[in-house]
Image (spheres, rainbow, N blue to C red):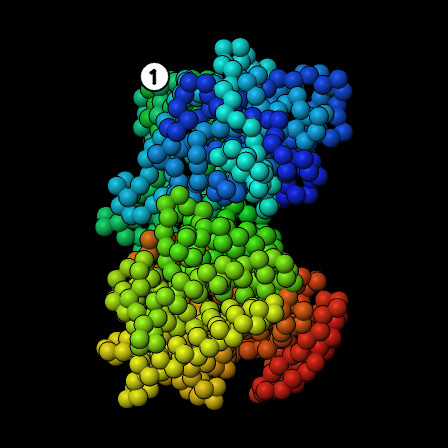
Amino acid sequence: MMLPLLFSSILATSPSQQLQINPQLLQHRWPAKWITHPVASTKEYGVFHFRKHFTLGQKPEQFLIHVSADNRYRLFVNGQFLVHGPARGDLAHWRFESVDLAPYLQAGENVLAAVVWNFGEFIPWAQMTHETAFILQGNTEAEALVNTNKDWKVTQNTAYSPLPVDSRTLHTFIVVGPGDRVEAAQYPWGWETSRFDDSAWLGARELGAGTPREMRDGGSHWMLMPRNIPFMEETLQRIPKIARTNGLQAGKDFLLGGKALTVPPRTAATMLLDQTHLTTAYPELLVSRGKGSTIKLTYAEALVDSNRDKGHRDEIANREIFGYHDEFLPDGGAQRLFRPLWFRTFRYMQIEIQTAEEPLVLHDLYGKFTGYPFEARAAFTSSEPALQNIWNVGWRTARLCAGETYYDCPYYEQLQYVGDTRIQALVSLYVSGDDRLMRNAIMQFDDSRIPDGLTASRYPSYVVQIIPPYSLFWIAMVHDYWRHREDAEFVQSFLPGIRNVIDWYERYIDDTGMLGPMPWWNFADWLDEWKGGVPPGADDGHSALITLQLIYNLDYAAELAEAFQRTAEATHYRALSLQLKQALQKSCWDESRGLFADTPEKKTFSQHVNVMAVLVALIPPNEQKAFVEKVLAEQNLSQCTFYYRFYLHQALKKAGLSDRYLEMLDPWHDMLKLGLTTFAEKPEPTRSDCHAWSASPNYDLLATVCGIEPDAPGFASVRIASHLGSLQWIKARMPHPRGEIVIDLSRKGASDIAGEITLPEGVSGKFLWNGKAQMLKAGKQKVAI
């Protein structure tokens, strides 16, 4: 909690695997012990501090350690913040971070200090746990003097208590953990510094040795593995705007950190701050004096009216803040820094102050933006300026929905769902080129598998949820990775899991040749007419959509099996796909409407079923264009919302209607007109203002408008089939595993196009326009068709 004002995240983008881990620590029991408080409950809510003094004869050139905790930790060296973690996983895949302490050590006395917390019954659903514990292991004998054992000291920080955040407090589903209430008078200020007196602290209790995953008879609850993703970004983010105040005067100089505010004694004051866009950040509040005061910080995506409706996100008048909050109770001391244990999501932050007999000095209030350190290596510009805003807001949406895992939404859940993650992963591949979070997600979903063969719908999550269609879309994720990255060993490792998913589905094919009644939650899209997002027939049998989703992913599974010489599997998948297609054609095609119905009863029809019919080639290629035009024109079909529009747009592309893609962006333009600074979960009224499946335009502007896609597995060759629609010109670049693809294209007359395309070294491809092709080679070249 007490941090140096000149904070720096020393290892902001360095993954553990870049440091040379002693191989003995990946094979054998660690000398270091998991440690905890000697008497406090290890299962209940608690915040604990651990310290270790040690002496060095000289400043070392390297001092490599490995560190982890349950639930989470922040590690300091001689008062300097170094690293936090562990990266989220499960007990069978518990990550540790590896860091070199040498730059922050000195000859003589040194101190390691860590804060470790367990949210107990208030734990976020995304956080797996066994009990409160901390471990730190030196890489070799040279660092062994800091190994955790009973010689470390520990204390429980009684300043902390939880502020529950759940559906009872916010009247909606929210599972991100509690707010913090901190009583400064109980806080051990300076605990992380070398000068702090810890003589009254207790000796730690040993729980058992650290054990690496796959060690024989490890005997530990945590199977330790090296961190496989970068450390999260933390960047200073000033708050640019004071929306309103009551009881105090504040200006721009306070927001810039240049002038303190003083709140007089016995005063109630409120200040509403507007970040001007949604963010994920650790707010940091620096205060002095104010003994007996209370400070409440409330966070929200938007302000609401008396009916709790959001309306235009910029509106302030006659609106109030409603969201989760933290509380800080100053003790009268100087330079007290409050920072919550976990980040907060907000556009608006309100600070409410009630002073007692002493004035309160507010020195500064700012945020530390945090998220996965994606860098935007792609860019898109065009003759339509409005698309630039969609691009920028889409990328912000994707960034806020990515931390140690992908998030469905940063405010309410912070859970990694397959349906969301498939789209998020494609966005991050295309815009950043960084595939590490995608790899991590694919592995975590595979790790989540239940004995039935299905993956969990979201993972990591200590509350198990099964959405069988999401297990199918996990197959699509593996296929996406195979198309875009050359990594045969990684992809091949998931083929048994793919078979498990398909085997599970085969059990439910009944004598109609379609899927019968399906267990679990068969979510498909957030439609008002589909209770719980479940399409007709999913629960009681013969859902065309669920059957089509199986066919769609069977076709992907067959491609993967064939690529890895699993011929019998590929043949089986293709035969099963054909059988299901024939049954669906027989049972659900309505000749009078020229559409597929949602069920054999043919009472309801949806865009979803019919776009999937195009994607699995149930509609002959020469009929697809007219068919999709019909699906778009018919207003009495259940309409795809933001999530399923991703598949609608893929159907446009397959049918040769990519030039209509820009017309499909009206819902995104509408969100911008409402003042959203990220894209929402679903049409208004929406719970979440930030949902990464709605960032799909960042993928499609590159993959559909620019038309850049793999033309062979591993992106070994490139296919560029641009579709400018109403645009006169486009310019774009995007990362490729071997470099960068750059295009600069302009229309010439009514039907021609010309420009330049650059491909990375060693990569060839083809450029397609209006049915004509021009072959491409590595390097920069002119194109004209």
Query: Which residue occupies 31% across, 77% down?
Result: 512
Pick the residue in front: 169 or 64.
64
Q: Position of residue 363 (x, y in %)?
A: 49, 28
Query: Which residue occupies 59% across, 26% down?
Result: 32
Relative height, residue 240 to residue 598 (above, below): above
Q: Residue furthest top?
A: 199
Report whether 404 appears left or right of 600.
right
Quadrant position of residue 195: top right
**Tag count:** 1
Q: Position of residue 186 (x, y in %)?
A: 41, 18
Asked if residue 113 shows in the view, the reply is yes
Quick one: label 1, few (<14), some, or many (20+) residues within 10 Å? few
Pick the residue in front: 712 or 468.
468
Task: Tell me the quadrant of the picture where the C terminus can be found.
Answer: bottom right
Relative height, residue 27 to residue 583 (above, below): above
Q: Which amino acid, mark 1?
A: Glu
Relative height, residue 324 to residue 483 (above, below): above
Q: Which residue is mark 1?
A: 357
Report whether 736 appears left or right of 622.
right
Q: Position of residue 739 (x, y in %)?
A: 70, 62
Pick the residue in front: 1 or 174.
174
Q: Secondary structure at mark 1?
A: loop
Q: Position of residue 627 (x, y in %)?
A: 40, 84
Report whether 667 appears left or right of 202.
left
Quadrant position of residue 577: bottom left
Relative height, residue 205 to residue 528 (above, below): above
Asked if residue 370 shows in the view, the reply is no
Query: Which residue occupies 37% across, 48% down?
Result: 464
